[in-house]
Each structure stands twice: as structure tokens, then as C-alpha cells.
Image (cartoon, helix red, strand yellow):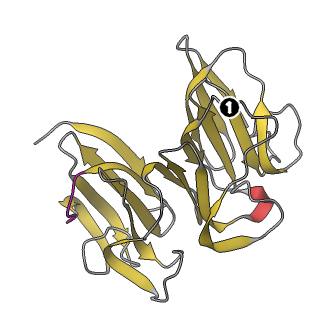
Amino acid sequence: TNPIIKVTCGEEHTLVLDNLGNLFSTGSNDHGQLGLGVTSNYVPNFTQIDFPEKIIDMGAGARHSLAVGESGALYVFGINNFPGSTHLNYRSPIVIPFHEEIVNVSIGDFNSLMVGKSGKVYAFGLNKYGALGLGEIQRTTAITEVPLPEPFDVDDKIVSASCGGSHVTVVTEFGNLYASGRNYHGALGLGDRNDRHTLTHVITEEPIIHVSTGSSYSLALGQSGHIYVCG
């Protein structure tokens, strides 16, 4: 068994990635979200998913999953939340054609966010409460570029994203943190409980190097090793 380097959990399924780029899945598979070529109530043991290349990142949502190949290709499987597709479910990973290499993905319940090699952020799915940072629209079935907040340092770029149930956070190369979406419980860390429909700068005590979001809360890891929580 090779060392596991990343784990991500959806609503009722889990994906794990080993150090050789192999991706494994277990749990609920009623919509093909495990990517194993079949649908079933559940798969009790971790099973390898077949890909034509090594995988570098992945995300698990309520009933769908994403994976990123070392080429930057975006693979999708599970219930159809996917741009340009007409099938009800995808039981095996398929590639969504896109003009930029993807380096990072994150999924909420029904919202998906991707970070491109250029630092641009892209999204598709449900945008209720501004959960994708796309303004007032309710959902998008096309991969849509997320507008950056203004002002935004042209020398900085977004390197990672994290989707919660109805909110999203992103971190930049310089350690800046931005958030959008539902803020009823204060999950955006902005000092109030007002929703935001576009990415908004979060004031932090130090540069942030990683962020993770849950259903209605967020945790950020500072450069010093301190952890900050809100929500």
C-alpha cells in the first residue's frame, strides 16, 4: 500500500489519493459518484478508479466528484451538474474540455470551484447566496470565470479554493483570503452576518496558507501555524 497524501469527503462518499497519483473511492454510489463504472447503493471498501493519467487533486460533493490529472485535465463523475452534458449520471470519469490547465478543485454540496494555472477561478453549479461568487445568478451549467475583487494585486494570484455548503473561500499566493456566499453564522469571517455575492477580502492577522470550509463555518491556517475559525 502506497502512502496516502490527500483525503476528501462528500456527503456520503470518500476519495483518497496516494503518492503515485492513484485515486480510490468508497461509500455511496447511487449516482456513480465513486467513478467505478457502475451505480450501487454503496461500496464498502476503497476501490481504485481507472484514469489514463496520474491524479493530482480531487473533490467530493453531495452526489458528484471531480479529479484533476497531471496534465491539468478536469475529470467529472456522478450526478449531472456538469457543463455541456445531457446524461443523467456519469458512472465513470469523463473529461470536460477546457481552455486552461486546472491545478486545484473543491466541491460543496452542489457547487464546484476550480483554480486554473493562471490563478483564475472558475465555477459551475448552484450559486444560491453567492456560493460561487458569481453575483446574483442562481446557478450556472457552464464553466464560468469568477470575477476577482477590486482592487486586486496584479502580481498576486489565487492558488487554492475551498467550497462549503453555501459559501466559498480562496487563498492567494501572497496569503490573502477572500470569501463569498452565505454568512448567516458568520462563516465568511467578515465581522457581520450579511451574505456576500462576490469574493470579498477577509482581514487576517497574518498571511493565510490554507483554508477549509464546512457547512456553515471556516478554518484558516496562518503562516505562523495558528488556526483561525469563524462561523
Most distant residue in the top direction: 224
Q: Residue at x 77, y 57 (%)?
A: 130
In the rendered view, tell whether residue 153 sits above or below residue 26: above
| Residue 111 in the image, given as x and y percentages of width and height | 60, 62
Q: Is 117 rendered above or below residue 65?
A: above
Which picture quadrant has residue 47? bottom left
Question: From which residue to which does the magenta span run?
Answer: 50-54
Give the residue at the far left of this rendering: 1
Is residue 147 or residue 2 the one in the foreground?
147
Q: Is residue 53 magenta?
A: yes
Residue 49 location, x and y as percent? 22, 63
Quadrant occupied by the C terminus: top right
Which quadrant does the N terminus fall into?
Answer: top left
Residue closer to the observer: 192 or 22 = 22
Element carrying mark 1: strand
Left or right: residue 60 versus residue 50 is right
Residue 35, picture quadrant = bottom left
Three-letter residue code for mark 1: Leu
**For this view, does 42 lie left or right of residue 59?**
left
Question: Compared with residue 123, is residue 201 higher up or lower down, i.e. above or below?
Answer: above
Percent coordinates x, y for residue 5 in the rendering: 28, 37
Residue 93 spot, x, y in % from top left? 32, 71
Task: Read off the residue under disc 1.
Answer: 177
